[in-house]
Image (cartoon, grey):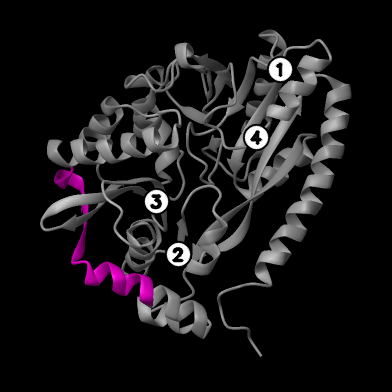
Amino acid sequence: MHIVVHDTLSGVNPDQWNALVTANNPFMRYEFLHGLEASGCTTIDNGWEPCHIAIYAESDRQQLLGAMPCYIKSHSYGEYIFDWSWADAYHRNGMDYYPKLSSAVPFTPATGPRWLVADTTDDTITDALLETAKNLVKEKQLSSFHSLFLTPEQASKAKLEGFSQRSSSQFHWQNRGYSSFDDFLAQMTSKKRKNIKRERRRVHEQAVEYRWLTGDELNETAVTQMAGFYLRTIRYYGAQAYLNRAFFDYLAEHFNSQTLFLFAYYQDQPIAGGLYFCSDDTLYGRYWGALNNFHSVHFETCYYQAIDWCIRHNYQRFEAGAQGEHKLARGLEPNTTYSVHWMENPQFRSAIDEFLENEADHIKRYQGSLNSHSPFKREL
């Protein structure tokens, strides 16, 4: 077993990396992660220094056994697991929280594996990846290691290895064998069903039409339009632009089979757009933007069109991103997401464990309250 820490993903064989990806998860594929580096979105200058762990069978690197995308972070932006209070606690005690080591998909709060292994029945490689991460924290004098939005199975494994586990909440849509969008609506309470029908009707009455684009349809015009919608939303909310035009160009050229653009048209002109990605069974909504204030176009672009797409393509899950309690009324239900953490300082590790235990109880109560207001009919 030979362990290498790569300062760029270009040092890894793309086919070997992708052979480890399960369910065709788009965000763990080589093309997506490499695209972020190649376009300049994840660099040491913007606080995402690549530090990818790879385990090979031999020193000649001919056989990749396991991998974990990692970044040395000088901040917590673009992670969506908020640890600013932890950084403040370090600072108040005369210690540096940054830099830290994060195993995450940059700018993407989507559930998936955060380490890849050739043989999932053998814990040897997983143990080596996690141990290497902890060793990097020591060697590079970092404060901590964080693995974000990983699967429940990987979170449980890391917890058994002594990592602190953190719970968060997102709204996801589940396909319960719906045959059509109307079938989906039929499972909802009358009030919620009528509200969704009203919102969709308003979009139709404004003569707004939709079209999904993927593959070769992601031409220069489509890329320009989607990048424009993204930047418009960023400017409107005064947010940080994590992605740049070069990344959108990269997606169209190198990753168009798992990238989808959804456009809303009025009089043949695009007035809104949504950026989506897909695995073999899950659709992921990432960003959206609009030019004009058309009534209910936000809900149609970000939720209803995506749910309808999933039903028509027999997809089992739709993840619409972080936050948004308004998603509950649109048929997306609260789901627990997980991250794991390793604090090098034992005292802080103990304090954070206590904090996470209390936070987990709060998440359970919060989700219980949300479920009591479920938009779906109650089973008798």
Helix, strand or loop at disc 2?
loop
Crowding at label 2, few (<14), some or many (≥20) Cα neighbours within 10 Å? Answer: some
Q: Which mark is residue 82?
A: 4
Asked if one can make out residue 250 in the rendered structure from this viewpoint, the answer is yes
Q: Earlier in the sequence, mark 4 or mark 1?
A: 4
Name the mark nearer the viewer: 1 or 2.
1
Q: Position of residue 347 (x, y in %)?
A: 89, 23
Q: Disc 1 on helix, strand or loop? A: loop
Label 4's element?
Answer: loop
Residue 97 marker: 1
Q: Is residue 213 magenta?
A: yes
Q: Which three-letter amino acid code belongs to the residue tagged 4?
A: Phe
Establish if 97 lies above or below 84.
above
Marks 4 and 3 in Cβ contact (< 8 Å):
no
Q: Residues within 10 Å of mark 3 (few under 14, many from 20)?
A: some
Could you tell me which secondary element the residue under label 3 belongs to?
A: loop
Name the residue type under label 2: Gln
Write the start and end of the magenta stretch as one range: 198-218
Q: How far is disc 4 from disc 1 in space, using C-alphas?
A: 13 Å
Measured in 3D between alpha carbons, the distance from the residue under mark 2 to the one under mark 3, in whole angstroms, is 10 Å
| Residue pictured at 27% horizontal, 28% vertical | 245
Residue at 43% x, 21% y: name it.
42
* Disc 2 target residue: 316
Distance CA(mark 1)–CA(mark 2): 39 Å
Residue beneath the point at 75% across and 27% down: 86
Which quadrant of the rendered structure holds the N terminus? top right
In the figure, 192 relative to 50: above or below?
below
Position in image of residue 378 (x %, y %): 63, 83
Q: Amino acid at mark 1?
A: Tyr
Residue for point 48% across, 31% down = 106
Marks 4 and 3, the one that precedes in the sequence: 4
Q: Quadrant of the C terminus?
A: bottom right
